[in-house]
Image (cartoon, grey):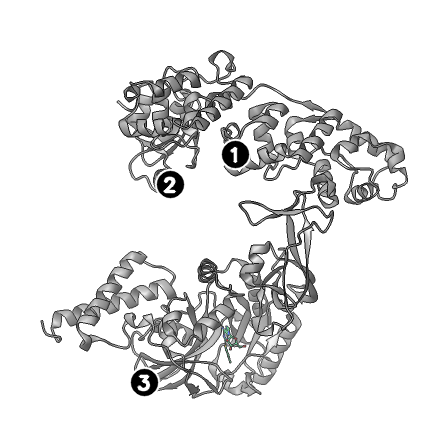
């Protein structure tokens, strides 16, 4: 086949056209019509053809977006028309003032404006000759920019050629920016490589666009919006900016869909307020809005002053980010002893308020962002969120900047600080000896959802702790009127009333008590779940991790925290002291749900033995009434009667370790002591049925309507939930099952169809 072969040429042209069209749909319309994989396939086909037939290569091919060999420097590029900047208006009055000047300048009573988002990126100039992208530059000083053509070419939203009738030459002006999603991805990648993080999308976009190696730029998910036209040749400009924008769109350039035509100053202000409200929800940063006189002839009439036009103005939002100096880092000790680094900043006005403290999250974040004391940092405060230090302006780092170090001893109580073995958390081991932990534990204990003791506020607790009249929650119940009489000012209510309020809470419902203890990771819901299912404080305190995880909603990590809390000596004695003061209400036997889940089969399935899911665990335990009996069965010669060879081997291997046997026996013993795991002691309300204790999720089109299938499952004692988790026993999948099926497969959940469900309900063995 010769290089001029028509069919190859036609295919190459068709592929280019298709890829252009898909780029346009994706970047300009935000309405992709094919998947990324399909796009990639078309792209690769074109790439191969171009490689095979070099004569068919072309600068405006979509394959040219992958970047080219690095430059040693950017060449200067003189703008044919200067790239001006905008004057700013801060506040409504300044905006009205702008409108007044425009009206006076034009001698009109009202003016039409075009309102646009002010994109927080970098201004670029794009030259198209005969419709083909030829050259592009940064703004530079407004007169001369830098030739960044190679980098711009890699931006997928930038059309390499224009559609329809095109002028001989046209300069398009616009903004290159990095949407939030792309910014997060860049930072995730940077974190994975152990590189420094980018401070904000604007800096990341600037860094990407100023790469000398365009192959690097090609990896950055930059976007572009066009917002105007500069120089042109052979083009009859329309009369209005709105029409210019329409033309840009028709040529295939991405133009923001947030742009609106508005009328007069009030129309502008209304747009400003609507954009301010939408700002947080937009997929990219905007730092304000821009208003431009719509009529181009009127712009001519108004002209420019200095380097900014009289016909446009930027109405800025209050900055959500500001630079300031990190003067020091303090460590605050939380209720559970976790030490959180807090930035002490040179006070700066940001997001509409003065900020002098900001969170630094944790030590890993500090290391990742390479934040040092003395650094100039970027502080962000958006809406009501706690101000945070986003990153460092490295160019401004002083030579004596100090690395932030975690103190070895707690700044409050002097106890040792230890790093959580798995996590990034450092904790003071002082527990209630540490006044910071004690104060917060007490505040938590008296709070509304916990013991709900009215009138004991933060100030009173602080004073009582400082005077050492409170050393643990139990001490609250020993307080007398005399103890607080001298602190009357801090008490919101009279001392006698306060003592009364405390006395009223000598009796606590179990869920409140569990929540009030302040166990890490145990919020109100988990406390309620623990109380409902285990029924007594002793059981909650003693429950082994596996037993805790039998409760729906409690995973391994929460179970571990609960075990840690009760296993810790300090906590144990504080709990004992408290129990000596109070009575617990609402204790009851273990819940039916837990009783049914706590079956031999479930315990076995929980051991995560290779090849042994819930169905096979069911099969293996049929007729066994104890762990002892189960172990005999496993050790016996005929285990193959219940299991296939592979699973049998996995089970034998597991039980070859005596540690595993001991664990299972201990679990059994605990459950028997809890009054479950014993046919005789099962509570009366245990739903009898073949599906007792099993959880199901339904997906796809089943033989019957879903609610009927759900009713059948529930009638047989099973539970139906709406989402798949590791605790799901079965996914019942019908036709056209989608993401739930994928998730179930990923989690190793047994997938069955409706027929298999019927067999389960009828008590048949699924393995047959
Ligand atoms: S018009 C003379 N429109 O703001 C008109 N600029 O302070 C000049 N910008 O350098 C630009 N969004 O980087 C215009 N919709 C928009 C804009 C916008 C962001 C930036 C641009 C420019 C700076 C001017």
293 lies left or right of 634: right
The picture places residue 81, in percent across and down from the top left corner, at 45, 87
Q: Earlier in the sequence, mark 1 or mark 2?
A: 1
In the depicted structure, whether residue 306 falls above or below residue 398: below
Q: Can residue 661 be seen in the rendering of this structure?
A: yes
Q: Position of residue 137 (x, y in %)?
A: 42, 81
Residue at numbered disc 3: 168
Q: Earlier in the sequence, mark 3 or mark 1?
A: 3
Label 2 or label 3, whichever comes before in sequence order: 3
Residue at 58% across / 70% down in the picture? 393
Q: Which mark is residue 1?
A: none
Q: Position of residue 157 (x, y in %)?
A: 37, 68
Q: Position of residue 126 (x, y in %)?
A: 39, 79
How many numbered dots are placed on residues in this image? 3
Classify 572 as above or below 358: above
Q: Nearer the viewer, mark 3 or mark 1?
A: 1
Toward the viewer: 155 or 570?
570
What residue is shown at x 71% (from left), y 26% (from top)?
579
In the rendered structure, find residue 554 and report the number of the disc placed on it: 1
As measured in the structure, the alpha-carbon distance from the residue carrying label 2 to the one carrying label 3 is 55 Å
In this rendering, position of residue 356 left or right of residue 211: right
Residue 247, visible in the rendered structure: no
Q: 229 or 151: which is nearer to us?
A: 151
Q: What residue is shown at x 88% (from left), y 33% (from top)?
A: 481
């Amino acid at each position: 086949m010769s290089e001029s072969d028509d069919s190859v040429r036609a295919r190459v042209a068709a592929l280019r056209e298709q890829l252009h069209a898909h780029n346009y749909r994706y970047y300009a319309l935000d309405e992709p019509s094919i998947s990324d994989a399909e796009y990639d396939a078309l792209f690769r086909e074109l790439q191969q053809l171009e490689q095979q037939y070099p004569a068919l290569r072309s600068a405006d091919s979509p394959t040219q977006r992958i970047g080219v060999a690095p430059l040693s420097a950017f060449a200067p590029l003189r703008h044919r028309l200067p790239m001006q900047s905008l004057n700013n208006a801060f506040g409504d009055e300044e905006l009205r003032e702008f409108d007044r000047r425009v009206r006076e300048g034009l001698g009109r009573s009202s003016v039409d404006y075009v309102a646009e988002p002010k994109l927080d990126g970098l201004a670029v100039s794009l030259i198209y000759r005969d419709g083909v992208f030829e050259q592009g530059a940064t703004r530079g000083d407004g007169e001369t920019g830098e030739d960044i053509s190679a980098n711009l070419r890699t931006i997928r939203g930038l059309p390499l050629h224009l559609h329809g009738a095109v002028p001989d030459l046209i300069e398009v002006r616009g903004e290159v920016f990095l949407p939030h999603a792309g910014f997060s991805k860049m930072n995730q990648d940077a974190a994975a490589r152990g590189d420094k993080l980018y401070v904000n999308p604007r800096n990341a976009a600037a860094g990407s666009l100023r790469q000398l190696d365009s192959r690097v730029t090609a990896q950055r998910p930059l976007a572009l919006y066009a917002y105007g036209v500069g120089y042109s040749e052979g083009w009859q400009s329309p009369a209005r900016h709105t029409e210019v924008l329409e033309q840009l769109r028709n040529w295939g350039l991405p133009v923001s869909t947030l742009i609106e035509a508005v009328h007069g100053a009030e129309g502008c202000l209304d747009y400003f307020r609507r954009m301010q409200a939408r700002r947080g929800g937009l997929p990219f940063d905007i730092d304000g809005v821009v208003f431009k006189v719509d009529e181009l002839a009127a712009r001519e009439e108004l002209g420019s002053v200095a380097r900014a036009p009289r016909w446009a103005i930027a109405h800025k939002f209050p900055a959500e980010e500001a630079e300031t100096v990190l003067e020091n880092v303090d460590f605050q000790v939380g209720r559970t002893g976790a030490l959180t680094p807090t930035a002490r900043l040179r006070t700066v006005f940001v997001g509409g308020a003065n900020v002098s403290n900001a969170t630094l999250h944790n030590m890993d974040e500090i290391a990742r962002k390479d934040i040092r004391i003395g650094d100039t940092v970027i502080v962000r405060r958006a809406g009501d969120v706690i101000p945070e230090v986003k990153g460092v302006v490295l160019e401004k780092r002083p030579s004596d900047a100090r690395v932030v170090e975690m103190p070895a001893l707690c700044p409050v109580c002097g106890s040792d600080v230890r790093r959580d073995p798995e996590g990034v958390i450092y904790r003071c081991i002082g527990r209630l000896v540490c006044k910071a932990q004690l104060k917060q534990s007490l505040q938590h204990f008296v709070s509304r959802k916990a013991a709900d003791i009215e009138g004991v506020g933060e100030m009173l607790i602080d004073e009582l702790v400082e005077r050492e009249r409170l050393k643990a929650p139990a001490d609250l119940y020993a307080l007398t009127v005399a103890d607080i009489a001298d602190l009357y000012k801090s008490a919101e209510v009279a001392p006698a009333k306060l003592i009364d309020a405390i006395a009223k809470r000598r009796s606590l419902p179990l869920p409140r008590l569990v929540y009030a203890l302040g166990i890490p990771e145990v919020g109100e819901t988990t406390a309620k779940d623990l109380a409902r299912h285990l029924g007594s404080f002793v059981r909650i305190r003693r429950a082994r991790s596996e037993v805790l995880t039998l409760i729906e909603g409690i995973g391994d990590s929460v179970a571990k925290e609960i075990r840690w809390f009760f296993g810790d000596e300090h906590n144990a004695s504080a709990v004992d002291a408290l129990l000596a003061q109070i009575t617990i209400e609402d204790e009851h036997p273990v819940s039916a749900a837990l009783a049914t889940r706590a079956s031999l089969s479930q315990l076995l399935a929980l051991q995560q033995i290779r090849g042994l899911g819930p169905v096979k665990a069911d099969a293996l335990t049929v007729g066994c009434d104890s762990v002892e009996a189960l172990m005999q069965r496993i050790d016996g010669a005929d285990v193959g009667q219940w299991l296939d060879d592979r699973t049998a081997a996995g089970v034998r291997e597991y039980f070859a370790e005596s540690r595993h046997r001991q664990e299972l026996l201990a679990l059994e013993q605990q459950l028997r002591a809890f009054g479950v795991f014993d046919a005789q002691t099962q509570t009366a309300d245990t739903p009898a049925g073949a599906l007792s204790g099993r959880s199901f999720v339904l997906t796809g089109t089943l033989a019957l309507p879903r609610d009927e299938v759900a009713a059948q499952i529930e009638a047989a004692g099973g539970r139906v939930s709406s989402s798949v988790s590791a605790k799901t026993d079965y996914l019942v999948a019908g036709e056209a099952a989608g993401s739930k099926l994928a998730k179930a497969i990923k989690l190793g959940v047994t997938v069955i169809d409706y027929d298999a469900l019927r067999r389960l309900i009828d008590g048949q063995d699924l393995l047959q």
